Amino acid sequence: MLLYSAPLSLFARKVEIALAEKALKFERVMVPFSQTRGYSPKHPAVVAANPKEQVPVLVDGGLTLYDSTVIIEYLEEAYPQHSLMPQEAAARARCRLLELEADEILLPPVRKLMHRTELPGPDFARHEQQEAEAAEAEKLILGNYSALTARLDSQEFFCGTFSLADIATFIVLHYGIRLGGPSLASHQNLEAWYHRLLLRPGFALAVQEIAAADRALSHPVAPRQPGSDK
C-alpha cells in the first residue's frame, strides 16, 4: 500500500491517522511543498491519479484512489479490523454526517487563518484585510466549539465509540489551534476529548510531524495570548 501525502496537508494527515488506527502498513511518499511555490511542480503520480492534482492519493495493489473520505471508506470495507465506524446503520449515517460537517462546516473558517503561516509580504493593507477576515472566522470557530461541546456532551467519543468522526473533527480543530485560532480551554469536555485523542499513537505522531514541518516550512504563528478567547 502506497500513500502520497504532504507535510502540511490536513486531508493527507487524516488518512495517515486512519491507517495508523487500523494498524495497516503503508509506504509514504511525501510530496514536496514550500510556502513560496506551494506544490509546484506537482508530483506527476498525483497529477495522473487525481483530476484535482491534490494529495492524498492511495495506491493499494491495482486500485488507485483519491479524496480522504473515499480512501477511508475503502479502507473500512477492505480492511474491517479495528473498525472506524459504528455497526448499526443509523449510527453509521450520523458518523458520516459528522465527518462531512468537519470537512464542510468546521474547515471553512479555519481556512481564513491559513495566511498566518505564509511569509509576510509588502502589502500591509492585504494583511490587515486577511486578519480582519480571520477575526470574523474565529467567531465562527468559537460557535463551532460550542456546538461540538453540546454534541459530545458526556460521551468519550462523538459516535459513542471511537470513529472516523473523531479523526475528521480532531484534525480540523488541531489545524485551527495550530494557526493561532481559539483554544479549547473554555470548552472543558471538548478539550478533554482532544487530549484523550493525543494519547493515541497515530494522532500523536501526526501532530509531532506537523509541528516539525511547520518549523521547517512555515512562518512562525504568534502564540495565542492567555485569556484572549471570547
Image (cartoon, helix red, strand yellow):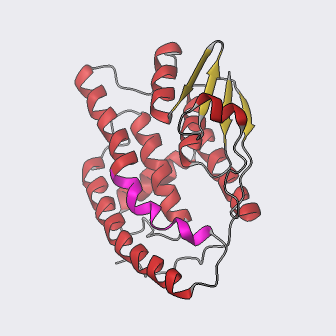
Q: Is 186 situated above or below 38?
A: below
Q: Residue at x 45, y 28 (%)?
A: 84
**Left or right placement of residue 181 versus residue 121 in this view:** left
**Nearer to the camera, 219 or 211:** 219
Mark yes or no: residue 200 visible. Answer: no
Residue found at the far bottom of this picture: 124
Mark yes or no: residue 85 visible. Answer: yes
Q: Residue at x 26, y 49 (%)?
A: 151
| 115 magenta-colored | yes
| Residue 43: percent from left, percent from top | 71, 39
**Nearer to the camera, 8 or 157:** 8
**Left or right placement of residue 82 versus residue 63 in this view:** left
Instruction: Magenta stretch: give its range.
Output: 105-117
| Residue 204: percent from left, percent from top | 62, 47
Looking at the rendered image, the quarter that the N terminus falls into is top right
Q: Residue at x 53, y 43 (%)?
A: 11
Number of marks in the rendered image: 0
The main secondary structure of the magenta stretch is helix
The quarter of the picture where residue 48 lies is top right
| Residue 55: percent from left, percent from top | 60, 39
